[in-house]
Image (cartoon, rainbow, N blue to C red):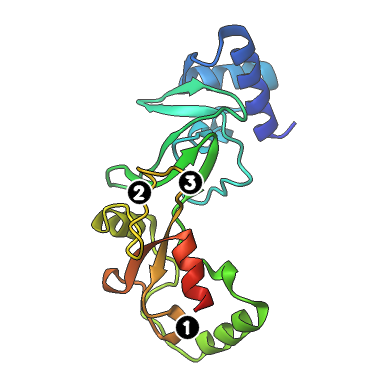
């Protein structure tokens, strides 16, 4: 079994025995993983498996969510496909926690940068060529910290239509370059805005 499979199996057993409100500590997870599967504590990072937390380098579409992170090394065992709703937090090294997305009915959504997927293949190839001829001072993708700063500055609302996840949970907010990256726009606060997915796709179509 992979470590992911071991974690799922362990939490499923706990939920079946104690229900999905059972609170477990990091040390207890490590002890049970060693006892049940022989897996050493250095291989286990429970915060990678949370509905409400994301760590650097984690691809949430591939990493199963089974816990709610409570802080202070404690986790609530929820199991797979639990209809969790709430904010998703990230803690940059040496900084306080910031909100970087939301979880709706167990589906984790991280606020992305501009939606390049709405472009046609021809447009994508064209922009890729243009990108290669422009020297940027910043990386294309905003950091999680910068994403949060833009969301907070824009009051967690779409700058075009005012849509907000606070009023409509189906609203997905994107971080968009005002002057496109392909046209030399930099990834800085003055050139970023919050758009909902509908307005961002509409922008690409215009």
Above or below, 59 against 31 in this view is below
Q: Give the residue at mark 3.
A: 170
Q: For the point 64% across and 77% down, which residue is it?
A: 120
Left or right: 91 as drawn, with respect to 45: left
Residue name at image x 48 percent, y 34 percent? 47
Q: Which mark is residue 182?
A: 1
Query: Considering the image in quadrants, where does the N terminus appear?
Result: top right
Q: Answer above or below: position of 196 versus 104.
A: below
- Closer to the N terminus: mark 1 or mark 2? 2
Q: Residue 22: x percent and y percent?
A: 50, 13
Q: Secondary structure at mark 3?
A: loop
Q: Is 142 or 126 nearer to us in this picture?
A: 126
Visible residue check, residue 114: no
Mark toward the start of the polypeptide (2 vs 3): 2
Q: Residues within 10 Å of mark 3 (few under 14, many from 20)?
A: few
Q: Which residue does the numbered mark 2 point to in the structure image? A: 92
Residue 71 or residue 39, whichever sits in front: 71
In the displayed structure image, the side of residue 140 where residue 71 appears, left or right? left
């Amino acid at each position: 079994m992979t470590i992911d499979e071991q974690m799922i199996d362990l939490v499923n057993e706990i939920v079946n025995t104690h229900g999905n409100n059972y609170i477990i500590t990091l040390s207890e997870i490590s002890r049970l993983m060693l006892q049940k599967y022989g897996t050493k504590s250095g291989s286990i990072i429970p915060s990678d498996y949370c509905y409400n937390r994301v760590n650097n380098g984690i691809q949430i579409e591939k990493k199963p969510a089974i816990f709610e992170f409570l802080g202070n090394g404690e986790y609530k065992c929820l199991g797979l496909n639990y209809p969790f709703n709430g904010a998703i937090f990230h803690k940059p090294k040496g900084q306080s926690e910031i909100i970087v997305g939301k979880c709706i009915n167990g589906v984790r959504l991280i606020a992305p940068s501009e939606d390049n997927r709405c472009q046609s293949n021809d447009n994508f190839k064209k922009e890729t060529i243009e990108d290669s001829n422009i020297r940027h001072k910043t990386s294309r993708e905003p950091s999680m910290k910068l994403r949060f700063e833009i969301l907070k500055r824009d009051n967690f609302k779409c700058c075009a239509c005012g849509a907000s996840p606070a009023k409509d949970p189906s609203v997905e907010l994107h971080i968009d370059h005002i002057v496109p990256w392909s046209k030399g726009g930099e990834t800085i606060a003055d050139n970023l805005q919050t758009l909902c997915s509908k307005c961002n796709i509409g922008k690409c179509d215009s």
